[in-house]
Amino acid sequence: PSIAEVTDLIEIALGSIPNRQVWVNPDCGLKTRGYDETVASLINVVAATRAVRERVHAH
């Protein structure tokens, strides 16, 4: 998934669940992906998580 897609999903979760209860974990589909695709996905998940954390902590 793209950074924007992951960011949107995190934001949706934060709209329903308290911040301290949201944990971002990779999808279970990574085992069926190749190495390059898995790394790219994890990089996007980390980037999205960092971006959302920065916004949350800025408020």
Image: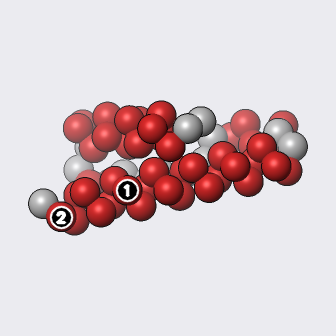
Q: Quadrant of the N terminus?
A: top right
Q: How is the image coloured?
A: secondary structure
Residue denoted by label 1: 51
Residue 41, given in percent of the width and then of the height, sits at 66, 46
Residue denoted by label 2: 58
Task: Locate residue 8 relative to residue 24 in the image: left or right.
Answer: left
Q: Quadrant of the C terminus?
A: bottom left
Residue drawn at (30%, 63%) of the image: 54
In whole angstroms, how far apart are the C-alphas of marks 2 and 1? 11 Å
Task: Locate residue 18 relative to residue 26 in the image: left or right.
Answer: left
Residue 55, given in percent of the width and then of the height, sits at 25, 57
Residue drawn at (62%, 55%) of the image: 43
Task: Locate residue 6 relative to residue 30 in the image: left or right.
Answer: left
Residue 37, given in percent of the width and then of the height, sits at 77, 43
Q: Which sits in the foreground, 45 or 16?
A: 45
Kindly identify the amino acid type of the residue bearing the numbered disc 1: Ala
Neighbours of disc 2 within 10 Å: few (<14), some (14-19), many (20+)? few
Answer yes or no: is residue 13 visible. Answer: no
Q: Which sits in the foreground, 55 or 28?
A: 55
Residue drawn at (27%, 44%) of the image: 14
Q: How many marks?
A: 2
Question: What SS does tag 1 mark?
Answer: helix
